[in-house]
């Protein structure tokens, strides 16, 4: 994993992970991995970081999915999330480890997996 402190939009972060690390924004499949990534990110930044999940409306219903197409078998959403209004990207809080829906154009640090 690599935590990148430079602030980027979600799509720009995804391109950075691909071009620099030949990877992608991280997916998270367990509570232990979520905690590990929270601690790792917290050593670099106080900001919530992008992870590789997008929530969007597909075939008439809202769903969240990982950019790397891995199974959606774990989630750590904060209460009232994810939002089902517009397509949103996902942050992992360095403070509480919870995930929140955010507009994809926001500038944030991010975590690449490779």
Image (spheres, helix red, strand yellow):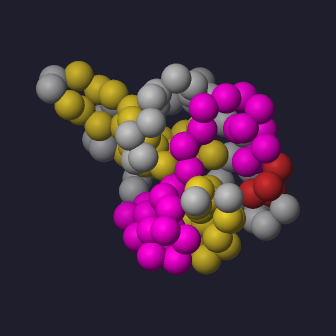
The residue positioned 67% from the left and 29% from the top of the image is: 30
Image side of residue 98 versus residue 53, left or right: right
Image side of residue 26 versus residue 44, left or right: left
In the displayed structure, would residue 104 be above or below residue 56?
Answer: below
The residue positioned 54% from the left and 43% from the top of the image is: 27
Residue 36, picture quadrant = top right
The residue positioned 50% from the left and 62% from the top of the image is: 23
Position in image of residue 114 (x %, y %) = 58, 59
In the displayed structure, would residue 38 be above or below residue 75?
Answer: below
The stretch drawn in magenta includes residue 97? no
Is 18 or 108 nearer to us in this picture? 18
Residue 42, picture quadrant = bottom right
Position in image of residue 45 (x %, y %) = 76, 65
Image side of residue 37 versus residue 87, left or right: right
Position in image of residue 59 (x %, y %) = 15, 26
Work out which quarter of the rendered image holds the N terminus and state it. bottom right
In the displayed structure, would residue 32 be above or below residue 4?
Answer: above
Q: Is residue 83 visible?
A: no
Q: Is residue 68 visible?
A: yes
Image side of residue 60 versus residue 23, left or right: left
The residue positioned 46% from the left and 27% from the top of the image is: 72
């Amino acid at each position: 994993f690599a935590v990148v402190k430079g602030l980027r939009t979600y799509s720009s972060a995804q391109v950075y992970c691909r071009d620099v690390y030949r990877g992608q924004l991280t997916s998270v499949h367990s509570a232990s991995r979520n905690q590990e990534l929270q601690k790792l990110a917290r050593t670099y930044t106080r900001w919530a970081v992008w992870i590789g999940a997008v929530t969007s409306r597909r075939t008439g219903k809202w769903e969240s999915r990982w950019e790397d197409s891995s199974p959606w078998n774990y989630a750590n959403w904060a209460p009232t999330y994810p939002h089902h209004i517009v397509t949103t990207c996902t942050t992992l809080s360095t403070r509480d480890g919870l995930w929140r829906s955010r507009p994809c154009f926001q500038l944030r640090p991010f975590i690449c997996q490779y």
